[in-house]
Image: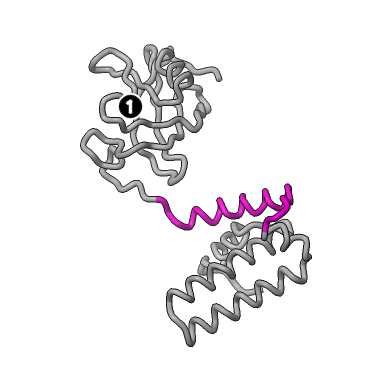
Amino acid sequence: MKIDFEKMGGLVPAIIQDATTKNVLMLGFMNEEAYKKTIETKKVTFYSRTRKCLWTKGETSGNFLNLVSIANDCDSDTLLIKVNPVGPVCHKGTDTCWGENNNANPLLFLTSLQDFIEKRHEEMPEGSYTTSLFKDGLNRMAQKVGEEALEAVIEATNGTNERLVYEGSDMIYHLIVLLTSKGLRIEDLAKELQVRHDPNWHKH
């Protein structure tokens, strides 16, 4: 990776993003030595412009930024660093340097689940329930979606909210399996709903 450290006198901005939540946690600066140490140790290291030295985030607090990936921008002078943070990031004790909570949106898990099911479809490991569904074929997968949808309806009308969430989760899981078998993803449904949200959308 070619990084232009010369444009800002030996430093580049480093935007720190949580690899899981996708939230921006902080902004720091790196020189070439800090970048190399980050790569070597897998813990994000910055260059302090006030102290004129390297500092590894968490070296005193224990709140390290464990490296996941580094990407360079189009001008090769700004880094996007994805991390798994250990504890709060800000020295003031907050999750981010903007005082925001670094909470994951649970909806993001649907993409992770989709990726997992796609991997099952590619590898078809023995002993996996998901594998057995793919092997049973399209009709069985579609039937399972219908069965789980009916169970969700029953819980909605005569059951509890807890059971409705349980059966609704089963329905979504089996629907993702069915979509995967057809070469589709749960995001395709999200895109369709996004289109329908437009006031100018007309049913076709």
- Residue 201 placement: quadrant: bottom right
**Residue 135 painted magenta:** no
Residue extending furthest toward the front: 127
Q: Quadrant of the N terminus?
A: top right
Q: Return the residue at label 1.
A: 57
Q: How many marks?
A: 1
Which residue is located at x 37 percent, y 50 percent?
103
Position of residue 119 measured from the top left corner of the image (x, y, whole percent): 67, 48
Q: How is the image coloured?
A: one colour
Residue extending furthest toward the left: 92
Q: Main secondary structure of the magenta part?
A: helix
Which residue is located at x 36 percent, y 37 percent?
86
What amino acid does circle 1 point to?
A: Lys
Which residue is located at x 51 percent, y 54 percent?
109
Residue extending furthest toward the bottom: 158
User: Looking at the image, is 140 positioned above or below residue 127?
Assistant: below
Taking 122 as reference, is 147 left or right?
A: left
Badge 1, how many Cα within 10 Å: few under 14, some, many 20+? many
Position of residue 155 measured from the top left corner of the image (x, y, whole percent): 50, 81
User: Looking at the image, is 188 positioned above or below residue 32?
Assistant: below
- Residue 9 placement: quadrant: top left
Position of residue 43 measured from the top left corner of the image (x, y, whole percent): 41, 26
Residue segment shown in magenta: 104-128
Q: Secondary structure at mark 1?
A: loop
**Residue 109 painted magenta:** yes
Q: Quadrant of the C terminus?
A: bottom right
Taking 42 as reference, is 131 left or right?
A: right
Position of residue 197 measured from the top left corner of the image (x, y, whole percent): 52, 67
User: Looking at the image, is 199 positioned above or below residue 91?
Assistant: below
Which residue is located at x 56 percent, y 61 percent?
190
